[in-house]
Image (cartoon, grey):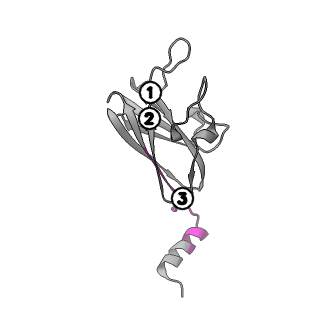
Amino acid sequence: MLSCSRLILCAAVLFGSSCLLAGEIILTVANVRSSDGYLLAALHDCEETFPNEGDALMYAKVKAVAGKTRLRFSVEAPGSYAVSLFHDENDNGVLDTNLIGIPVEGYGFTNNARGTFGPPDFWDAIVRVDGGVIAQSIQLTY
């Protein structure tokens, strides 16, 4: 006879594992300069889409809190993920830049990855999710 937990596991395997999560990514975003607007974050699972917001696997939008703001992603499949985010202070939905393309709103990436003359490489920003909770702190750059 199967135990209750084994029955639930068997049912999840037979009927799809969408109810099971591989883990969570919890981000504490530091250096948020004001409570204006929102933090917009995009979760990516492949190099080809990172950091383009329109091609992300999942999105999060949370009200900005001056100092530190927290957000989370629940991940269904184990794998390598990277998060790009920015502080949309004027709530227009885009990362505003100056005339030469330098961001004028705060931005950041998992692992506090930095690029040279542009965004970082996907592989510098990845976090491995294979169960449990991954907690990271991201420092916004303005």
Q: Quadrant of the N terminus?
A: bottom right
**Which is more N-terminal, label 1 or label 2?**
1
Instruction: Name the residue nearer the viewer: 97 or 4.
Output: 97
Stretch of the chain drawn in magenta: 10-27
Tell me if mark 3 has few (under 14), some (14-19) or many (20+) residues whose alpha carbon lies within 10 angstroms of its own.
some
Residue furthest to the bottom = 1
Tell me if mark 1 has few (under 14), some (14-19) or many (20+) residues whose alpha carbon lies within 10 angstroms of its own.
many
Judged from the image, the secondary structure of the residue bearing numbered disc 1 is: loop
Pointer 3 residue: 22
Judged from the image, the secondary structure of the residue bearing numbered disc 3 is: loop
- 11 inside magenta stretch: yes
| Residue 113 versus residue 16 in the image, above or below | above
Pointer 1 residue: 106
Residue furthest to the top = 99
Q: Nearer the viewer, mark 2 or mark 1?
A: 2
Location of residue 76 (image quadrant): bottom right
Q: Position of residue 19 (x, y in %)?
A: 51, 62
CA gap, disc 3 to disc 1? Answer: 30 Å
Pointer 2 residue: 139
Q: Nearer the viewer, mark 3 or mark 1?
A: 1
| Residue 19 versus residue 34 in the image, above or below | below
Q: Mark 3 belongs to which amino acid?
A: Ala
